[in-house]
Image (cartoon, rainbow, N blue to C red):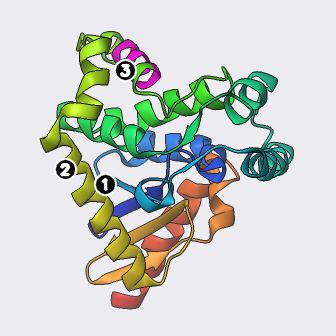
């Protein structure tokens, strides 16, 4: 096969990105060397907001639609303690910084932490915009992979580590530039770069599980080979 790269564009608080988690895990297992994670910043910076009843109702309605389509869990605890919680921010900035932090340790940890935080939010009903919650979930992952970390120190770095913030902001800017160049507006999205060409996969392929997405990746690569050979 021609050498290729896979871009996964996402936001940690995007319900449809959670819906694509099984497919992403398939990419991680099949194409870990080719996979590049790209935080879009959709719900950070200017896209962040306090959670209010109107937004909570919108999110919950959308989440129920996602759950009906995919079978993934959006729990009552998530609805009551996160969407309807007190003083909750809808801000993926802290998670983006956490994902950048573990990526500096080992790039394969980024999709793992993303999934752990999605489970913490949507299943366990934890506020994953909170640095304290993120620090605990990240520390648990790092301990599990033999990279012990202090959860308080990790959480503090999400607020105080200026280099980490700068690196995260740069990743988001690069992702937004890529999306703008290709006319991409929503997430999640999977792109396949082969030589000078970029192929955008249909979004529906992200919600049918790992086998469907891996099959589409293989078909795209084979299609490219047929064009150049």
Label drawn at residue 135: 3
Q: Nearer the viewer, mark 3 or mark 1?
A: 3
Look at the numbered disc 3 and give the secondary structure of its residue: helix
Q: Quadrant of residue 50?
A: top right
Whichever of labels 3 and 1 marks the residue nearer the N terminus, that label is 1
Residue at the image position 23 percent from the left and 28 percent from the top: 157
Q: Nearer the viewer, mark 2 or mark 1?
A: 2
What residue does disc 2 label?
167
* Residue 129 makes an appearance in the image: yes
| Residues in magenta, as a range | 133-140
- Is most of the magenta stretch helix, strand or loop? helix
Reply yes or no: does residue 134 show up in magenta: yes
Whichever of labels 2 and 1 marks the residue nearer the N terminus, that label is 1
Residue at the image position 77 percent from the left and 44 percent from the top: 53
* Residue 229 makes an appearance in the image: no
Bin the neighbour count of mark 2 within 10 Å (Cα to Cα): few under 14, some 14-19, many 20 and up: some
Whichever of labels 2 and 3 marks the residue nearer the N terminus, that label is 3
Look at the numbered disc 1 and give the secondary structure of its residue: loop
Q: Are marks 3 and 1 in contact (CB under 8 Å)?
A: no
Residue at the image position 44 percent from the left and 53 percent from the top: 44
Relative side of 140 to 121, left or right: left
Bin the neighbour count of mark 1 within 10 Å (Cα to Cα): few under 14, some 14-19, many 20 and up: some
What residue does disc 1 label?
34
Relative side of 132 to 164, left or right: right
Residue 143: where, in percent of width, then height? 31, 10
As measured in the structure, the alpha-carbon distance from the residue carrying label 2 to the one carrying label 3 is 18 Å
Between 106 and 133, the residue placed more toward the observer is: 133
Residue at the image position 60 percent from the left and 23 percent from the top: 126
Relative side of 197 to 148, left or right: right
As measured in the structure, the alpha-carbon distance from the residue carrying label 2 to the one carrying label 1 is 21 Å
Bin the neighbour count of mark 3 within 10 Å (Cα to Cα): few under 14, some 14-19, many 20 and up: many
């Amino acid at each position: 096969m021609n050498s290729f790269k896979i871009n996964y564009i996402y936001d940690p608080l995007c319900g449809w990105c959670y819906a694509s988690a099984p497919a992403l895990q398939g990419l991680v297992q099949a194409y870990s060397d080719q996979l590049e994670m790209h935080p879009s910043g959709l719900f950070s910076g200017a896209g962040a907001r306090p959670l209010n009843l109107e937004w909570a109702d919108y999110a919950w309605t959308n989440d129920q639609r996602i759950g009906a389509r995919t079978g993934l869990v959006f729990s009552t605890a998530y609805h009551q303690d996160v969407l309807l919680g007190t003083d909750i921010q809808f801000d993926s900035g802290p998670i983006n910084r956490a994902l950048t932090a573990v990526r500096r340790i080992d790039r394969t940890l980024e999709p793992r932490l993303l999934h752990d935080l999605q489970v913490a939010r949507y299943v366990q009903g934890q506020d994953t915009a909170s640095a304290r919650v993120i620090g605990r979930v990240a520390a648990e992952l790092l301990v599990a992979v033999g990279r012990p970390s202090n959860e308080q120190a990790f959480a503090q770095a999400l607020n105080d580590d200026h280099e980490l913030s700068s690196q995260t902001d740069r990743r988001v800017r690069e992702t937004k530039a890529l999306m703008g160049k290709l006319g991409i507006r929503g997430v999640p999205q999977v792109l396949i770069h082969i030589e000078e060409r970029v192929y955008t996969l249909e979004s529906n392929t992200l919600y049918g599980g790992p086998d469907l997405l891996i099959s589409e990746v293989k078909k795209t690569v084979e299609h490219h080979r047929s064009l150049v050979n």
